[in-house]
Image (cartoon, rainbow, N blue to C red):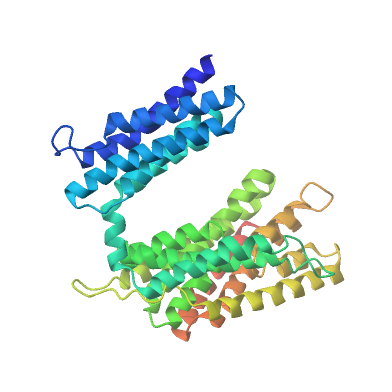
Amino acid sequence: MEPLILRLGLALAIGLLVGLERGWRERDAPEGSRTAGIRTFGISALLGGIIAAMSEAQKNQIVFAAGLLGFSMSLTWFKLREARRDEDFSVTGVVAGLCVFSLGGLAVVGDYKAAAAGGAALAAVLASRELLHNLLKRLTWVELRSALVLAVMTAIGLPLLPNRAIDPWGGFNPREIWFLTVLSATISFGGYVATRLLGRTRGLLVSGLAGAIVSSTAVTASFGQKARSGEPARPLVGAASLAAAISLLRVLVIVLALSPRLLPLILLPLLTAALVSVACGSLLLAKGVPAAGQSVDARNPFELVPLLVFVSLFAVTATLGAVLVTRIGNNSLIAISAASGIFDVDVAVLTALRSAGGTMPLETVGAAVLVAALVNAGGRIFVAMLSGSAGYWLPLGLVSLVAAAGGASAYFLTT
């Protein structure tokens, strides 16, 4: 009995949450002039839960279907009368009522966590009416098309691809490669949205740092496309440099979690390189801030053709790296780390850390991790050359060179 009471309480809470938003929006209406408010929505969700419990007790799904049909007809009839009086053609209230009734039933006989999340999401969507309407008014066709392409790439393209290597060497994994493409497109689109909302500098910071948590290479490719499309290169180089620093800090976190003994050997070189990247990136971002009153031109969120060129080159390089690893075997850990770290430093670092618990000397493993980070920096410059203009990849290459020199100096001073 107790679980049923709790679930009915959840159903009531879902209805009251949605009804709170509906009631607040119509709080100035005269008493009794509206079909549904906070009490009606709460009772509707509770009614859905009660009918769902009755349907489950009688083991007859028709009971709930009949209840939903009767509720929808009653709510629609009252809403129709209200709409005729107010000359209001919105169907949102009816759909919200049906959702509340259904979520009440789900909370009682289904996944109550999904029902609670659905209720919160429904209330949030209803409360965001002005925001969503203003967004639609400002949305351009290019932005809408980019969002649709990104949705197709993610929801349709990604699940259909096999998540395994299809070449004899184990380097060409279609889903992993396409995931990097989707990630690059997402970073580009997210950066576009952040630039529109926060301004160029803060928008680039948000999109670059967030994307670098997963892949600084994808961030480099995304910003390179922006530079090629005509956006100012200096702030893009600054944001890409900060993303490179995040990549180095991510390596330190991985080593700390999996092989803490290795940390003293690589901490100072990687931290020095990261600090140099942060300093240079911050300086470039500060100099790239638009002057007061200067408009910020946010261009096409992303272009598909450069993305496809990038992913093709990445696939070829990943396959060639796997071939090289196969040819070398396990005799040269540093060479393997260099080959596998061109585009994905995490894979190279994890490969090196597997040897840390064996007979391989820690100094060799540490050197392999540092070489992987260095080669990955070179891979990012290669990606920048392919995706961006000379005004983008040349200063980015210079920043990477200075950071690598700082890291190398720290390494030789401590060994």
Horizontally, residue 328 falls left or right of residue 219, namely right
- Placement of 155 over or under 142, stated as above or below: above
- Residue 212, image x and y in percent? 51, 60
User: Considering the image in quadrants, where does the C terminus appear?
Assistant: bottom right
Horizontally, residue 93 falls left or right of residue 272, namely left
Q: Nearer the viewer, residue 116 or 259?
A: 116
Q: Nearer the viewer, residue 228 or 298?
A: 298
Q: Nearer the viewer, residue 73 or 375?
A: 73
Horizontally, residue 174 falls left or right of residue 9, namely right
Residue at (49%, 24%) from the top-left corner?
Answer: 7
- Residue 190, image x and y in percent? 43, 63
Q: How many marks?
A: 0
| Corner quadrant of residue 368 | bottom right
- Residue 373, image x and y in percent? 63, 64
| Corner quadrant of residue 181 | bottom right
The furthest residue to the top: 1
| Corner quadrant of residue 36 | top left
Residue at (24%, 44%) from the top-left corner?
Answer: 81
The reply to whether residue 16 is in sight is no
- Placement of 228 over or under 167, stated as above or below: below
The reply to whether residue 283 is in sight is yes
The furthest residue to the bottom: 390
- Residue 315, image x and y in percent? 69, 74
Residue at (31%, 41%) from the top-left corner?
Answer: 77
